[in-house]
Structures are given as C-alpha cells and as structure tokens.
Image (tube, helix red, strand yellow):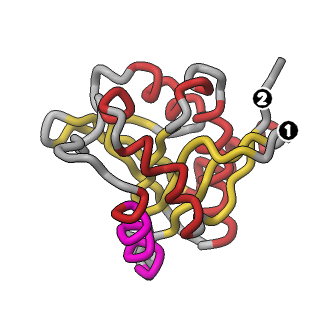
Amino acid sequence: MTISVYIRPLVIEDASTSYAWRNDPLIWVYTGYKPTHYISSEIETAWLREKLARTDQLRFAICVKELNTYIGNIQLLDITDRDAELHLFIGNKLYWGKGIGYQATVQMIRYGFLIKELEEIYLKVHPANIAAITVYEKAGFEITGKKNDLIMMSITKSKFVCLQNQEA
C-alpha cells in the first residue's frame, strides 16, 4: 500500500507534536542539529514562532493524506529571488523508508519553481545518508560538490521542467 502525503504551511500548533522529535537523537543523526538539552513544547513553540516570522524561509508540514496526520517537516531556507536551500526530515519514525521523503521533496520542488519562481534549489546531505541521497537523485537533484564534509546537490528549474515533460 502506498502512503500519500501532502504539504501544508507549518502552524504554531504543530509545535505540540514536533517538540518530541527535537528530543529524539535518532532523527538528527545525519544533520547539523544535535539536541543538547530537553526541548519542551513551550521552547519549541517560541522557536517556531520566531522561524515562521522570517521572510527568507518557508516551512511546511508533511502530512499523511489518509489520516491527516503531521509526520515531518520540509522547508526552503535562505530564500533569495533566485534560489533556496531545501531541508527535509520525517519526525515520525513509523513513516521512515516509505517513499514519503520523495513525495514531499517533489511537492516542495514544484512549489519552489512554480509558485516562488526560483531558478535553483540546493541542499546539503551527509554522505552516509544513502537513503536521502537516493531520494534527492530520484527527484532530479545532482551532486555538485562537497563542502564541510557534506555532499552538495542542486536542481535547476530547467531540469525540473524537462523531468515534468518526460513524465507527461
């Protein structure tokens, strides 16, 4: 059975779910974030309120369609007129390895190029995170280099359009 997901803008109320993810070190193995102290719902709410107010970021919840359940985040950060950096994580580990990261990535790419009219979306990924690299390559990202021991990947709007035309 395929699990379908949708993305929607994050809202303050999502902090009541996401704070638990911030306290789970397994979720952060391949990221730059390492929990150093307990994150309460109140701390997460204040953090999210500050992040949602920023104009150079767009943060979305990943939700399972059938259950209308919030299971992770995907965001575009450091947004300029031309490009943005993609970040993704599935906080609910029951949904790891189910193709959700790919679905959410494609939806965010579509949003970035068609709604925000970006020219490029890029990301950084830990070289040991083979599952994520596979997801990103399947979505059309290409490896562009290495920086600070992380793999750099990107996709351009023109490549996205080509991929969309191939699927049609």
Q: Nearer the viewer, residue 109 or 15?
A: 15
Residue 23 in picture, x, y percent from top left: 34, 40
Question: For the point 74% across and 40% down, which residue is it?
Answer: 64
State yes or no: discs 2 and 1 in contact (Cβ < 8 Å). yes
Choose top left, top right, bottom left or bottom right for residue 50: bottom left
Q: Amino acid at mark 2?
A: Ile
Residue 161 in picture, x, y percent from top left: 68, 52
Residue 38 in picture, x, y percent from top left: 26, 47
Give the crowd class for mark 1: few <14, some 14-19, many >=20 residues within 10 Å.
few
Residue 164 in picture, x, y percent from top left: 74, 45
Q: Nearer the viewer, residue 30 or 136?
A: 30
Residue 3 — which label?
A: 2
| Residue that numbered label 1 is attached to | 66
Question: For the point 80% across and 37% down, which residue is it?
Answer: 167
Choose top left, top right, bottom left or bottom right for residue 30: top left
Give the residues drawn in magenta, as a range: 44-55
Q: Nearer the viewer, residue 38 or 48?
A: 38
Measure the C-alpha gap from mark 2 to mark 1: 8 Å
**Residue placed furthest toward the left:** 148
Q: Amino acid at mark 1?
A: Glu
Which secondary structure class fits the magenta region best? helix
Whether residue 74 is situated above or below residue 47 in the rendered picture: above
Whether residue 130 is situated above or below residue 154 in the rendered picture: above
Answer with mark 2 or mark 1, whichever residue precedes in sequence. Answer: 2
